[in-house]
Amino acid sequence: MKTIILFYSRSRKTALVAKILAKEVNGDTQEIIDLNDRQGPLNYLKASMDAFRENKTLINPATVDLTNYDLIYLGSPTWAGKPAPAIITLIDHCNFIGKDVILFATMGGSGGQKVIERMKEKIEPRGGRMIKSFLVKTGGKKMEELVEDVKEIVRDEDLPIYGI
């Protein structure tokens, strides 16, 4: 039984959370890259509109083979109260049948619960079983604080560890 953490990260905060999480739960990681330029203020505004409208995007990898994994963590930043377009696209391209899924959202301030709810709505019809979810507030926090926050979440939420 193996674990994988799938994530998209524009600002690198979700990436930091995913990498700490992987270390804490003994999981592999796979970053999902949005092939559209999302850097800079204008592209960020466009990205937020794409997220709000749930527009698909081109991603790399286009899909992830989850065959060898029993537990899938899926993480997205919060954009306009929605998951990032790269995560919406990934969900539509993956087979979650028979997989346990833990969802997480990073957020500067608020809106993360809506992200979790939307990811759950998309994953369950694709066969995934959401067993837990959690939020990580990243706004105004230093790297050291985020590291401690994620370790605390793993401990307090009693997150399952598969593959040990």
Image: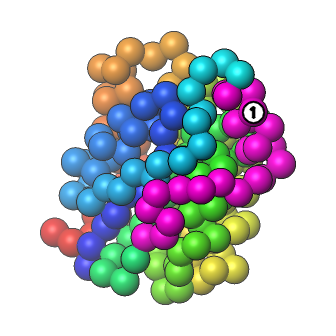
Percent across and percent down for residue 11 are 49, 28
Residue 89: % across, % down: 63, 61
Residue 139's spot in the image, x, y percent?
55, 19
- The answer to if 119 sits in the magenta stretch is no
Task: Tell me the amino acid under the disc marked 1.
Answer: Lys
> Residue visible at 34% across and 63% down?
4
Residue 64 appears in view = yes
- Vertical side of 162 occupied by 79: above or below: above
Choose between 66 and 113: the one closer to the eye: 66
Q: Relative to 93, is 14 above or below?
A: above
- In magenta segment, residue 55: yes
Task: Farthest residue to the right: give it.
Answer: 53
Left or right of residue 3: residue 10: right
Specify start and end residues of the magenta stretch as a single range: 43-64
Residue 155, position as x, y percentages in the image? 32, 46
Asked whether the viewer can see residue 131, the reply is no
Secondary-structure class at tag 1: helix
Give the residue drawn at x 26%, y 79%.
1
Q: Please state which of residues 126 and 48 is positioned toward the viewer in this rendering.
A: 48
- Compare residues 40 and 77 and report the one nearer the observer: 40
| 75 to 27, vertically: above or below | above
For disc 1, the marked residue is: 46
Residue 120: which quarter of the image? bottom right
Q: Quadrant of the C terminus?
A: bottom left
Residue 86 located left or right of residue 118 = left
Image point (27%, 73%), residue name: 2
Toward which corner of the image does residue 56 lie, by quadrant?
bottom right
For the residue carrying disc 1, how many other residues have a C-alpha within 10 Å: few (<14), some (14-19), or many (20+)? Answer: few
- Residue at horizontal 60 percent and vertical 66 percent from the top: 91
Q: How is the model colour-coded?
A: rainbow
User: What is the count of numbered marks?
Assistant: 1
